[in-house]
Amino acid sequence: MRIRQRIAGRFHSITAQLFVFFFLGMVVPVLVGGMLSYEKSKQIIEEQVSGVASTTVLQVRDKLNLLFRRIDDTSMTLLGNSTIQDTLKGRDPEGALSENELYKKAQKLLSDVMNYELFDIYIFDVHKKNNILTSDYSVTTDPWETEWFRRIKEANGRPVWFGLTDVSFLSSRNVALGYPVFGLGRAIRDLETGELLGVMLIEIRGDLLTKELNSLHFGKSGFVFLVDAAGRYMYYPDHQFYGKPSTYETMSTQETRRKNIELLQETLDNGWIVCGVVPMQEMIRDSAAIRNLTLWILLGSITLAAVLGCFVSRKIGRPLIRLSKLMKRGEEGDLSVRFEVVGRDEIGQLGRSFNKMVRRIGQLIRQIEEEEAQKKKAEIRALRYQINPHFLYNTLNSIRWMAKLDGSDKVADAISALVSLLEASLQRNGSYARLGDELELIRKYMQIQQFRYDNEIRLDIRCPESFRHLEIPRMLLQPIVENAIFHGIAPKEEEGCIEIRVDGHGSDVVISIRDNGVGMDEDRLNRLWRAESETSSGGMTHIGIRHVHQTLQLHYGSRCGVRIESAEGAGTTVYLYLSKAREARHVSGYAG
């Protein structure tokens, strides 16, 4: 939490904001522009690579279609040849040639058809009369029991293409030659009746495909392969996969994206599918140069933005922060602060205006403080002079009665107590006194009153030791106690009691002075605070209360003062509210 607060506090600084805004203002456009440029160039390269690969696959399709079409034309020529038809039937329609002569004529026809593309041609009689027509006599398998024989018969005259194999369909001569073969088969039917006469299988040199397809590469790992309609490999760069199911034909779009390849497909005229595997990441490797250039530009922009951001923030932000701190110190009361003006720009002008303002505020505050000090000194003097004559009158009057009633010893004690009270009243030791000393003066004052009333007034003081060193204005409690005696207890016949309690409430202190006198009703309590009651017969009481209330507010502020609770016949309680930390600056230097 503290770390987040510190980070948030630093971001509120104008220096940090200037740096961040300047930094982002330079880096973000370069970053966005670079990324868009890279993505666009990558897209263009991908489209170009895909276009070239598609064109290549289309060219391969056209070449293979041309090859397969020539071979298919050859098969169609043999399929409808009368010599082949007569030989499979075993008779010459004109009767000019014997069966053996027909066989030789058909074999010569096959030899004439053979070219560099064909490996061998086989024609088998479906009736197994051993009238096999071939360009070679190296047949080593029983053709009528093979899978390819069955497929050709079931095709009912349609061409059946067989993929590359390392082993010949009928012989093993190609092992010595070192290239595979693939085949085309057709069923031969009687052109007149449609009866199935035989099966023709043409074996084609496989190197016609392998040389063409092995030379095609898309990058280092891209290649081309052939599959039939069932998804079996008719050709694959690795001959071990001939005839096996293709894994690419069943690959989903997500799988191609995950492997980062593009699968291009074109269908041949014979039903096969030529497929190109294009590794896009490898083919667009040149776009990495654009990406690297973009990254270098971004890195340079970040460095330049950081340097310029620091420069701008130091040039503009730091003087403003310095000025803000000085203003805060001035707000807290330190008017000695000055801003070091550098330059003639707006910040310099602001600094000069700040210095003038602080100087002027200092002059005004000193003038106001001096005027207020004089005013408050006069107010406090006036308040104290209001109460001192009344106090001296009552005290001397008490001594006079004691002299009449008791004799000289009590008079001496009373005069001694009076001297101490006069010394405190005249403020010979300053405007403030410790609360403990003020309570002792109250005890001496009560000695005088007890002499007068012959110990019929009891004083009970309860003050925690921690509050006895608290400094309060002098002669703050005596007027309240005096009023409690003369206007609360004296009119009663019974014994009187005055209780003084000191309590703390946080930073505030409450002094309560309670008497068990006659009390006041609500109407008299209200008149006590009205200005017109100053001239009433109870004016001395009002002068004492008013003096204490104004003194508290002058010394501690407007929230402090006096509060009175009273009920007729139930006594009176006066609460004095003051603070532990007095507002010394309001009354400093007053002599009273």
Image: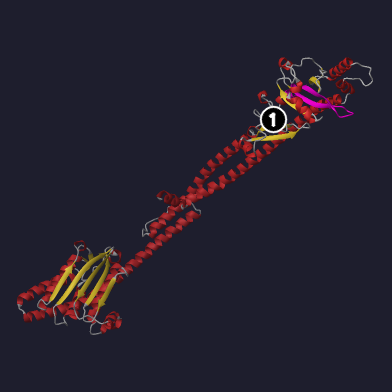
Pick whichever, 161 or 364, lies toward us. 161
Locate residue 540 relative to residue 282 in the image: left or right: left
Task: Label 1: state its secondary structure.
Answer: loop
Residue named by callout 1: 232
In the image, residue 280 sits, relative to residue 345, either above or below, namely above
Give percent across and percent down for residue 395. 14, 77
Q: Considering depth in this image, is 433 or 139 the residue closer to the camera? A: 139
Identify which residue is drawn at 54% across, 42% down. Answer: 302
Question: What is the magenta range?
Answer: 182-211
The answer to whether residue 32 is seen in the rendering is yes
Q: Is residue 294 above or below residue 77?
A: below
Q: Could you tell me residue 186's position as x and y percent?
A: 81, 27
User: Which quadrant does the C terminus fall into?
Assistant: bottom left
Is residue 341 among what the camera can see? no
Front residue of this view, candidates 395 and 197: 197
Q: Main secondary structure of the magenta part?
A: strand
| Magenta region includes residue 303 | no
In the displayed structure image, the side of residue 224 where residue 453 appears, left or right? left
Q: Is residue 70 left or right of residue 227?
A: right
**Three-letter amino acid code at disc 1?**
Arg
Residue 425 x %, y %? 19, 72
Q: Quadrant of residue 527?
A: bottom left
